[in-house]
Image: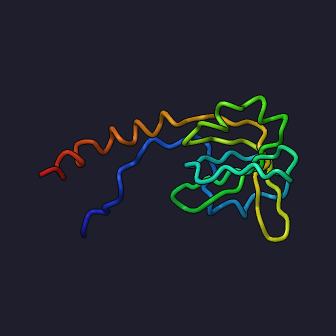
Amino acid sequence: MEPVTRPPDWPRPPTCLPHHLLHLPPEGARITVAGLVLVRQRPGTAKGVIFITLEDEFGVCNVVVWQKLFQKYRRAVISGRLLRVTGRIQRESGVTHVVAEHVEDISAMLDDLVALHEPTRAGDQP
C-alpha cells in the first residue's frame, strides 16, 4: 500500500467555512470566511457600500461591507491582503453574499505560509 501524500498543512484561519460550502448554512446564518482579497469595489451608485471578493483554495466569496462598518474596520478593508470576515449569509437571485459584521486583517499569516515553503524555494534556485 502506498502512503497517502497530501500537501503540507499551512496556517489556516480557525473556524472558517471553506467557500465551496457556502451553500450549506441557512439564510441569515452567522458564519466566518477567510481568503485572499481579489477585488475591492466601491461603486459611486452604491451609497458607500464596499464589495470585496475573497478567494480561498476552493473558490470565491462575495462580501458586502456597509458604510458604517467600513468606518470601523477601514484599515483592514483598505489594506488587508488576507481577510477573515464574520457576517451573515444573504442569498439573492442565486448569488450568495456574506454581509460583514466584523472584518479582521490576517495578512501576517501569509508570512507564515512563505516561511513554511522557504526550504523548497531555496532548492529551486540554480
Question: Where residue 99 appears, x then y in whole percent?
Answer: 79, 48
Is residue 65 or residue 89 the one in the foreground? Answer: 65
Asked if residue 126 lies left or right of residue 93, the reply is: left
Relative to 94, is 79 on the left or the right? left
- Residue at x-position 73% and y-position 62%: 24
On the rendered structure, is 121 left or right of 22?
Answer: left
Q: Position of residue 14 (x, y in %)?
A: 57, 40
Q: Is residue 3 above or below residue 33?
A: below
Outermost residue, front side: 44
Direction left: furthest residue? 126
Instruction: Note whether 70 is above or below 121 in the view shown.
Output: above
Corner quadrant of residue 116: top left
The answer to whether residue 1 is left or right of residue 114 is left
Q: Residue at x 68, y 42 (%)?
A: 85
Residue 85, placed above or below residue 98: above
Q: Give the x, y percent position of residue 102.
A: 74, 36
Q: How many marks?
A: 0
Q: Residue at x 76, y 51 (%)?
A: 98
- Residue drawn at (22%, 43%), measured in percent from left and top? 119
- Foreground of the two, 117 or 42: 42
Q: Give residue 87's position: percent from left, percent from top.
A: 77, 44
Check the image and tell me how it is coloured. rainbow
The quarter of the picture where the N terminus appears is bottom left
Q: Quadrant of residue 48?
A: top right
Judge by depth and name the residue closer to the eye, 34 or 4.
34
